Image: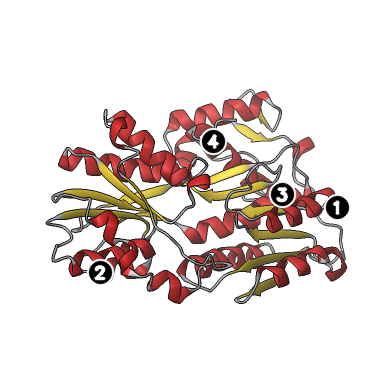
């Protein structure tokens, strides 16, 4: 399935809503116009989605042309007196605004559905989290939400959970594993931001990242950057304008102080190659924060000498001087949808992995 298709992405979200009894008690679904308003989509997109679900038997269209849920495929109701499902939310990370909002979204869904939530977290090591997940069924855990890193230890744990039949949803990229996942729409968000920089200033854009070179080909933000450059006839500049920061001793994951206080010297060789005026896209807000300082130390000014945009739109991005243009994603919605998708997997099962993406919106500010 092409998950860059608006209709396909909306269909997956709608299926989750059906399974979560969002329209429970209503004989018919709302009108196409009301659905378009609720899901912020066009009526044509809603109509295509409904037609597809009618074709596969999920929905039925009566003689009066109104649409209702096929009772044969209605979500399974829990048995009376059975215990509520318990899901685990597992992550090895410092609690920054992104983790906080994802957790809040998960908690929203858990409370709404009267489920139970078990947190498995660590600010010290991946191993303690992954070891706990290996024993998840013994703890009465019925499904796992996992914030995943691109590391072999995560791949091994995910594979073991899937092979054991444990319902699992990865928050982030599942790599090549057959696991359901939910992520931000990094590709289209970055494409929109880089395309806007090119449109506004008419020059190639520099891309600054901390990804290892071997991982760039599978990085959706970098893929979005390359597509925007190609679409604007600037493909010849992609290689020369890609700036990879040296991480030095590779930590298990980036602690908050390392994110916020990355050494400015790492930016210096790249900044020296940028002849003002120049346009720059930073892979995340933490990189942009340190790039601002490197620019000031070089005697340059963001917004005048360098147009700078980034991804994430964390709260501090708006407090930078000047405020940072950024791709904003509703990370609370990521958590909510992740829990919703896991609920469907735990109650009804999934014939194949489902991959959802939450849209990114580019917020233009004084930095560009």
Mark 2: give few (<14), some (14-19) or many (20+) Cα within 10 Å: some
Note whether 78 is above or below 64 in the view shown: below
Sequence order check, earlier mark of 1 and 2: 1
Name the secondary structure under disc 2.
Answer: helix
Instruction: Using the numbered discs, state the Cα–Cα distance from disc 2 to disc 3 in whole angstroms.
Output: 46 Å
Badge 4: residue crowd in 10 Å (few <14, some 14–19, many ≥20):
some
Can the viewer see residue 40 in this picture? Answer: no
Q: Which numbered mark, 1 or 4, is in the foreground of this view?
A: 1
Q: Which residue is the site of mark 1? A: 164
The residue tagged 2 is 293
Identify the secondary structure beneath mark 3.
helix
**Which of the two marks, 1 or 2, is nearer to us in this view?**
2
Q: Is mark 1 on a helix, strand or loop?
A: loop
Point out the tag, 1 or 3, that comes first from the N-terminus. 1
Q: Name the residue under label 3.
A: 344
Q: Of discs 1 and 3, which sits in the foreground?
A: 1
Instruction: Give the mark, 4 or 3, whose residue is nearer the N terminus.
Output: 4
Given contact means CB atoms under 8 Å apart, are the residues at marks 1 and 4 in contact?
Answer: no
Mark 3 crowd level (few <14, some 14–19, many ≥20, 10 Å Cα)? many
Q: Are marks 1 and 2 in contact (CB under 8 Å)?
A: no
């Amino acid at each position: 399935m092409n998950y860059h298709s608006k209709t396909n992405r909306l269909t997956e979200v709608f299926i989750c809503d059906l399974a979560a009894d969002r329209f429970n008690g209503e004989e018919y679904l709302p009108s196409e116009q009301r659905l378009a308003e609720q899901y912020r989509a066009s009526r044509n997109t809603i109509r295509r989605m409904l037609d597809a679900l009618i074709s596969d038997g999920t929905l039925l269209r009566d003689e009066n042309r109104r649409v209702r849920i096929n009772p044969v495929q209605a979500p399974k109701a829990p048995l009376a007196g059975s215990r509520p499902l318990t899901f685990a939310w597992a992550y090895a990370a410092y609690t920054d605004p992104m983790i906080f909002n994802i957790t809040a979204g998960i908690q929203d869904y858990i409370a709404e559905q009267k489920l139970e939530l078990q947190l498995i977290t660590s600010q010290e090591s991946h191993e303690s989290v992954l070891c706990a997940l290996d024993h998840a069924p013994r703890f009465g855990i019925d499904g796992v939400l996992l914030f995943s890193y691109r590391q072999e230890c995560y791949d091994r744990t995910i594979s073991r959970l899937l092979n054991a039949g444990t319902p699992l949803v990865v928050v982030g990229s599942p790599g090549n594993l057959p696991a359901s996942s939910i992520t931000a729409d990094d590709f289209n968000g970055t494409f929109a931001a880089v395309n806007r920089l090119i449109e506004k200033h008419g020059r190639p854009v520099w891309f600054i990242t901390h990804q290892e070179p071997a991982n760039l080909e599978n990085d959706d933000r970098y893929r979005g950057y390359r597509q925007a450059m190609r679409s604007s006839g600037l493909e010849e500049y992609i290689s020369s304008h890609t700036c990879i920061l040296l991480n030095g001793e590779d930590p298990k994951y980036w602690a908050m102080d390392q994110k916020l206080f990355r050494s400015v010297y790492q930016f210096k060789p790249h900044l020296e190659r940028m002849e003002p005026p120049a346009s720059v896209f930073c892979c995340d807000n933490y990189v942009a924060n340190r790039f601002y300082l490197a620019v000031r130390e070089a005697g340059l000014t963001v917004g005048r000498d360098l147009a700078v945009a980034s991804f994430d739109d964390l709260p501090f991005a708006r407090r930078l001087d000047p405020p940072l243009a950024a791709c904003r994603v509703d990370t609370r919605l990521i958590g909510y949808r992740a829990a919703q998708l896991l609920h469907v997997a735990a109650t009804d099962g999934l014939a194949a992995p489902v991959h959802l993406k939450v849209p990114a919106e580019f917020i233009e500010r004084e930095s560009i």
